[in-house]
Image: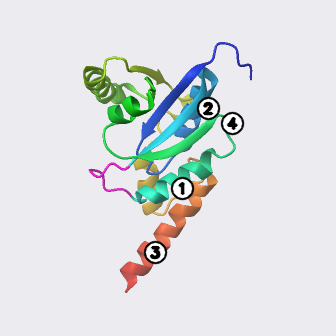
Amino acid sequence: MHTEGKIGICVYPGTFDPITNGHIDIIKRARYLFSKVKILVARDADKNTLFSFTERVRIVKTAISSIEGVECEGFDGLLIDYLKRTGITIVVRGLRAVSDFDYEFQFTLMNRKLYPPVEFVFVMPGEEYFFLSSSLVKEIAFLGGEVGEFVPKIVEEEIKKKLRIYEAHNKS
């Protein structure tokens, strides 16, 4: 992959519960455009996550470990506060379908209002990932389906562990 035309650092924020191959595809596409991509795993207390904040950060770090120029950290609070603190002004967001657009449009406009220097770059995954979401992966797993083709190996292993714990807990 050539490096001409790459620009600075961007962040790719999300809950990543769990990170999917669609997220990985977006990360690789962002890395093609930017010299460094920082994956920001949000604590996001409003969501009922399968994996804890600490688990999600660890899983994402493992999933991206072989992608050069990509790093991961967890963050708590407003994205804008993180951006102001670090001086980063470019945010990458993934768009799969028209249904994503409404949320992303509101998210972008509100963040621009709060921090005018911020720019959002929307990246579409490969068409094989348009249907893929973390919610769908969790639903398939909980209903006994295989998710290995949709997620990195670490995620498949961690989901299986969670399901074993869940099943053991429900049997007692």
Residue at image mark 3: 165
Of the two numbered discs 3 and 4 in the rendering, the one whose residue sits closer to the viewer: 4
Above or below: residue 37 compared with residue 151: above
The structure residue drawn at horizontal position 45% and vertical position 47%, both measured from the top left corner, is 74
- The answer to whether marks 1 and 4 mark residues whose Cβ atoms lie closer than 8 Å is no
User: Mark 4 to mark 2: distance in Å?
Assistant: 9 Å
Kind of residue at badge 2: Lys
The structure residue drawn at horizontal position 50% and vertical position 25%, both measured from the top left corner, is 124
Above or below: residue 68 compared with residue 44: above
- The answer to whether marks 2 and 3 mark residues whose Cβ atoms lie closer than 8 Å is no
- Residue extending farthest bottom: 172
Above or below: residue 119 compared with residue 127: above
Count numbered badges in the picture: 4
Q: Position of residue 131 (x, y in %)?
A: 46, 37
Query: Is disc 2 placed on a helix, strand or loop?
Result: helix
Q: Is 73 displayed left or right of 97 in the figure?
A: right
Quadrant position of residue 104 = top left
Q: Which residues are magenta?
A: 43-49
Kind of residue at badge 4: Glu
Label of residue 28 in the image: 2
Q: Position of residue 44 (x, y in %)?
A: 33, 48
